[in-house]
Image (tube, rainbow, N blue to C red):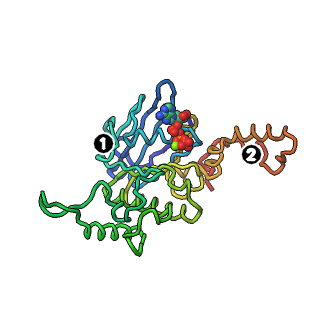
Amino acid sequence: MTDKTTSAHGAAPKDTPPERDRPLVELRGAGKAYGNIRALHGVDLTVRPSRVTCVLGDNGAGKSTLIKIISGLHQHTEGEFLVDGTPVRFSTPRDALAKGIATVYQDLAVVPLMPVWRNFFLGSEMTKGPWPLRRLDIARMKKTADEELRNIGIVLDDLEQPIGTLSGGQRQCVAIARAVYFGARVLILDEPTAALGVKQSGVVLKYIAMARDRGLGVIFITHNPHHAYMVGDHFSVLRLGTMELSADRSEVSLEELTNHMAGGAELATLKHELSQVRGVDTEELPEEDALQAPAATPEGKS
Ligand SMILES: Nc1ncnc2c1ncn2[C@@H]1O[C@H](COP(=O)(O)OP(=O)(O)OP(=O)(O)O)[C@@H](O)[C@H]1O
Ligand SMILES: [Mg+2]
């Protein structure tokens, strides 16, 4: 692993970082085995307030396994997992939520035919009146959902419209607004832009930045180094279950990140193999040397 992590604010004494900089979530040498399949091994990750930590990696690299540990779906089988500096072991996602860790999954847990406002409060409905006459406080839920969505810049004509009629990007944004409203301190987004076009991805990236500006620690899982680089403060690249690169923004350029993601050495091999096949024109591909991931240097950033 290439570790280039430095303190975000170099002047702060090492043992007592200021409150706002204290890690919310930390993995230290964490790993997970499913039976005898080792999906994740020796992973270090630090999530701080007001920072976007990007986790990149190819299919099967272990990204989902990593967030399942943090979101309480699975338990780590090696290393340490700390929240606010205290070692934890969650049994269910409810334990993670209780600590302010909210996860927005790619296949959003929404009910497509229910109105936007109902989905916003799904599972945490507002009620009014004393028991046993308690009933849903529909007016207050609509008003609050409207305000919260407006706060992050989503203006819908009609909150009664089924959430299924919103675009994929808008639905991701509603899910982000919901997590912020219910007091998340850590927001985990599993490939929120994977199924979206350029424009909608841009909108989602904007809300990721907005959540960060509100002080949340964001974990942004993605395949796409360009999306990661637009909002990321820190980049962790997973490969076959181990952390291949961990670098702050100032220490890695977009090209270097792309090369790490693409697996420069593998691409070079692939080009070599393709060039042996008749009828495949590899002339237009970059030189094999250029495909090797360069040793990242701090000056590498343009
Ligand atoms: N429940 C499970 N039981 C056994 N093996 C699993 C399980 N979940 C994941 N794995 C294995 O662990 C490895 C990492 O998988 P994981 O889903 O974390 O990767 P990923 O980076 O999220 O991939 P993708 O980009 O395809 O979503 C893979 O080899 C996968 O087959
Ligand atoms: Mg996955």
Judge the density around disc 1: few (<14), some (14-19), many (≥20) Cα neighbours within 10 Å: some
Helix, strand or loop for disc 2: helix
- Residue positioned most to the right: 278
Judge whether 75 appears above or below 169 on screen: above
Q: Which mark is residue 298?
A: none
Within 8 Å: ligand 1 and the Cβ of disc 2? no
Closer to the camera in the image, 18 or 119: 119
- Measured in 3D between alpha carbons, the distance from the residue under mark 1 to the one under mark 2, in whole angstroms, is 47 Å
Q: Which one is earlier in the sequence, the residue at label 1 or at label 2?
A: 1
Give the image location of residue 86, x and y in percent.
Answer: 31, 38
Label 1 with label 2: CB-CB less than 8 Å: no
Give the image location of residue 139, x and y in percent.
Answer: 26, 70
Closer to the camera in the image, 5 or 15: 5
Q: Which residue is identified by label 2?
A: 290
- Residue positioned most to the front: 113
Residue 190: in sight, yes or no?
A: yes
Judge whether 219 appears above or below 145 on screen: above
Rendered residue at 33%/39% (across/down): 92
Rendered residue at 30%/54% (across/down): 123
Rendered residue at 46%/51% (across/down): 189
Q: Is residue 78 left or right of residue 291?
A: left
Amino acid of disc 1:
Asp
Give the image location of residue 68, x and y in percent.
Answer: 43, 40
Q: Which residue is identified by label 1?
A: 95
Q: Quadrant of the N terminus?
A: top right
Closer to the camera in the image, 271 or 194: 194
Amino acid of disc 2:
Ala
Within 8 Å: ligand 1 and the Cβ of disc 1? no
Judge whether 68 appears above or below 188 on screen: above
Helix, strand or loop for disc 1: helix
- Answer with the quarter of the image where residue 25 lies: top left
Residue 39: in sight, yes or no?
A: no
